[in-house]
Image (cartoon, helix red, strand yellow):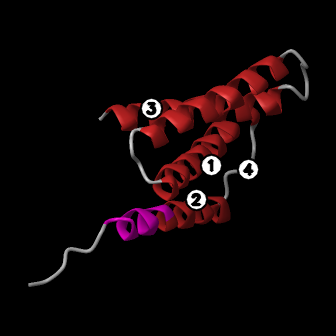
Amino acid sequence: MHKWALLGAAISVEVAATLSLRASQDHRAWLIVVVGGYLGAFVLLTMVLRTGMAVGVAYGIWGAMGTACTAVLAAVLFGDPFTTPVVVGIALIIGGVLLIELGSHHAVPRR
């Protein structure tokens, strides 16, 4: 459970940093949050990998959830478009990550 909490934290920090990057276009002070957020996200992702989670799974979930959360929150906070193609793209990303997750499990040999 610890690794999933760390991964959730890494995703949250990365999303905050990305949204702050958008906010920094109007106020440069947000760049402090951007730099700190990305550093924190990579530190947390490193900690996730140290728990034994496969890099393809960890990075895939981190990337997919980060993309999905950023798209939704950017639509809410900044009025970015949230169209059908955006929703389909997010669904495809999440579907791809699920396939990676399923494929990462070792096959049980038949007797």
What's the distance in space between the residues labelled 3 and 4, CA to CA?
30 Å
Residue located beneath label 1 in the image: 67
Do callouts 2 and 1 mark residues in contact (Cβ within 8 Å)? yes
What's the distance in space between the residues labelled 2 and 3, CA to CA?
22 Å
The stretch drawn in magenta includes residue 9: no
Q: Residue at x 84, y 22 (%)?
A: 31
Q: Residue at x 59, y 50 (%)?
A: 63
Query: Tag 4, which secondary structure?
Result: loop
Residue located beneath label 3 in the image: 6
Q: Position of residue 22 (x, y in %)?
A: 81, 33
Residue 90: mark:
2
Q: Quadrant of the N terminus?
A: top left
Total labels drawn: 4
Magenta: predominant secondary structure element?
A: helix
Do callouts 4 and 2 mark residues in contact (Cβ within 8 Å)? no
Tell me which segment is drawn in magenta. Answer: 97-105
What's the distance in space between the residues labelled 1 and 3, CA to CA?
18 Å
Q: Residue at x 65, y 46 (%)?
A: 71
Q: Position of residue 59 (x, y in %)?
A: 55, 51
Mark 4 is surrounded, within 10 Å at the Cα level, by few (under 14), some (14 to 19) or many (20 or more) other residues, namely few
Q: In the image, which is nearer the foreground, mark 2 or mark 3?
A: 3
What's the distance in space between the residues labelled 1 and 4, CA to CA?
14 Å
Q: What amino acid type is highlighted by mark number 3?
A: Leu
Q: Which tag, 4 or 2, sits closer to the chain's start?
A: 4
Left or right side of 32 for 12: left
The stretch drawn in magenta includes residue 101: yes
Q: What amino acid type is highlighted by mark number 2?
A: Ile
What's the distance in space between the residues labelled 2 and 1, CA to CA?
7 Å
Residue 81: mark:
4
